[in-house]
Structure formats: structure tokens, C-alpha cells
Image: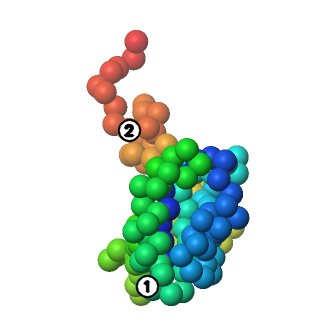
Amino acid sequence: MNIYVGNLAASVTEDQLREAFAAFGEVASVKIVRDGATRESRGFGFVTMPNEEQAKTAVQEMNDHEFEGQALKVEPGRSRTVPSGFGERRPGGGGGGRPGGRPGGSRPGGRPGGRPGGSYGGGHGGRPGGSGRGPSRGRGPL
């Protein structure tokens, strides 16, 4: 059984946690979750006990038990199920890029990936008097 152990003091080691839970039976593994950058404890971890009855007893006895100055939050761990829609592979996925791209990354009349007609900024294909960045605001020569 996987057991969640929360509200761990930052100083608690995996060996200390293993020893505390071993009082209730065999402990298969202990993992304290740590910050990826600093390697400091994130204040929770998991204990795995193969015997279901021993694990249930450990959960009951260790929940709200003071350990290294803090009251532990201990409960059966949740299974790692993926919510519907996450991680599923569906045929035809992907998308992204523009269809019909040419090898070499350049299109005629423009910069790489630009629109035909010489306009780089998109919008209206390089209308005279415009910047190529959208419709003209009706302003004439200043």
C-alpha cells in the first residue's frame, strides 16, 4: 500500500521516516519529495508497505502523530490515474505548421516564411501606401 505522509519537518530524512513506519511492519520504500533546484524537502513524501493490514495500522497510528516537532498528515496514497483526456494518443494529432511549405524555408517574393507578394508583416499583401502591417487608417500624405 502506498501511504502519503505530509507536514514533514524539513530536517526529516528518509531513514528516519523508514524507521518510524517500520515499527508497524515491513517498509518496501520511502521517498521524500524534494525541490528540483534546491533539493530541499517539499514537506511531504510517500511510504510503501507491502502488507495491507500493517499499512492501515500505520496510517491510523501515524496520522496527527508528532514527529520531529510537527503533527504528520498521513493517509492512504491515491493511485496515479490519469484524468480523461490527458496523455491519450489519438490518430491524426499534431498540427501546427503551415501546409505546403517548401524545402529550404523560403517562399517566393518574401522573407523565409513570408507571404507571396513581398509583404512581410502579413495582412494585405503589400498594398501601396501601407506598411504591410494591416489596413490603412485612411491617413493621406502629411
Q: Return the residue nearer the eye: 100 or 22.
A: 22
Residue under the point 41% across and 55% down: 64
Q: Colour scheme in the image?
A: rainbow
Q: Position of residue 45 (x, y in %)?
A: 55, 62
Lateral position of residue 93 relative to residue 106, left or right: left
Q: Nearer the viewer, mark 2 or mark 1?
A: 1
Residue at far left of view: 138
Is 128 placed above or below 17 here?
above
Q: Which mark is residue 134?
A: 2
Q: Picture coordinates of residue 29 (x, y %)?
A: 63, 76
Q: Earlier in the sequence, mark 2 or mark 1?
A: 1
Badge 1 marks a residue whose secondary structure is helix
How crowded pointer 2 is (Cα within 10 Å; few <14, some 14-19, many 20+) is rated as: some
Amino acid, disc 2: Gly
Q: Residues within 10 Å of mark 1 (few under 14, many from 20)?
A: few
Q: Amino acid at mark 1?
A: Glu
Residue ID at (59%, 48%): 68
Residue under the point 48% across and 81% down = 54
Is there any visible trace of residue 71 in the rendered image?
yes
Q: Nearer the viewer, residue 18 or 127?
A: 18
Residue beneath the point at 38% across and 46% down? 124
Expressed as whole percent of the image width and height from the top left, the position of residue 139 reads: 33, 21
Q: Nearer the viewer, residue 108 or 29?
A: 29
What residue would you read off at disc 1?
53
